[in-house]
Image (cartoon, rainbow, N blue to C red):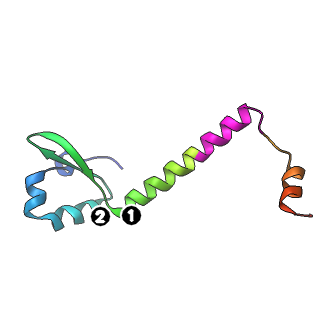
Amino acid sequence: MKTLFSQDIVPLSDLKVNPGKIVNQAKDSHRPILLTSRGRGIAVMQSLEEFENHEEERAFVKAIAQGLLEVQEGKVQTVDDVKRKLGINI
């Protein structure tokens, strides 16, 4: 998702005038919209779908990082131990 500065920076006044247009732009482009006031960035708007996807990705990456840290700390179990704890008799 690459920001297109010619399209994805919107003054807050434009949002006030036509909020539906800006919301649809974020939804249809799948890119975040940078809202500005007096030439400075003040907020970012993105579609709900994109927000949820990013949250899911963050949670996944966090879980991987936690797992790698546990491996480094020696907090590992054998497959047989896990099967036994889960009651799997294969």
Inspect the image, locate mark 2, and give the three-letter code of the amino acid beneath it: Lys
Taking the magenta stretch, the answer to whether it contains residue 64 is yes
- Provide the residue span drawn in magenta: 63-75
Residue 23's quadrant in the figure? bottom left
Inspect the image, locate mark 1, and give the three-letter code of the amino acid beneath it: Glu
Spatial distance from mark 1 to mark 2, Cα to Cα? 8 Å
- In the rendered image, residue 18, in percent from the top left (x then y), is placed at 11, 64
Q: How many marks?
A: 2
Question: Is residue 49 shown left or right of residue 29?
Answer: right
The numbered dot on residue 88 is: none
Question: Which residue is found at the position 8% from the left and 41% from the top?
Answer: 38
Question: Which residue is found at the position 67% from the left and 42% from the top?
Answer: 67
Give the labeled residue for mark 2: 27
Taking the magenta stretch, the answer to whether it contains residue 40 is no
Label 2: which secondary element: helix
83 relative to 34, above or below: below
- In the rendered image, residue 63, in percent from the top left (x then y), is placed at 60, 47
N-terminal of the pair, mark 1 or mark 2, is: 2
53 relative to 44, above or below: below
Question: Which residue is found at the position 7% from the left and 62% from the top?
Answer: 17
Give the labeled residue for mark 1: 49
Kindly indicate whether the residue at mark 2 contacts the one at mark 1 (C-beta within 8 angstroms). yes
Instruction: Say which of 25 and 19 sits in front.
Output: 19
